[in-house]
Amino acid sequence: MALIGKEISDFTVKAFVNGEFKDISKEDVLGKWAVFVFYPADFTFI
């Protein structure tokens, strides 16, 4: 299901950015290109 061009709902998540954990919300990504990966343990060594 493609959601390109659709508006996202309000959200707040923890993200690892530049070596530290930060809270990211909808306001942080509005007007910018963003890719969201919803997969447990993605990008880990295992």
Image (cartoon, rainbow, N blue to C red):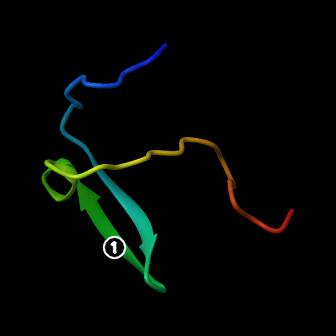
The residue furthest bottom is 19
Q: Nearer the viewer, residue 3 or 19?
A: 3
Question: Does 27 appear above or below 17?
Answer: above
* Image side of residue 40 versus residue 26, left or right: right
Name the quadrant containing residue 13: bottom left
* Image side of residue 24 versus residue 45, left or right: left
* Image side of residue 15 versus residue 32, left or right: right
- Please state the horizontal and vertical placement of residue 44, each as a whole percent of the image: 74, 65
Q: Determine the secondary structure under disc 1.
A: strand
Q: Residue at x 42, y 65 (%)?
A: 15
Question: Does 23 appear above or below 33?
Answer: below
Q: Nearer the viewer, residue 26 or 35?
A: 35
Query: Which residue is disc 1 drawn over?
Result: 22
Q: Nearer the viewer, residue 25 or 35?
A: 35
- Please state the horizontal and vertical placement of residue 30, each as a whole percent of the image: 15, 48
- Please state the horizontal and vertical placement of residue 36, each as a whole percent of the image: 45, 45
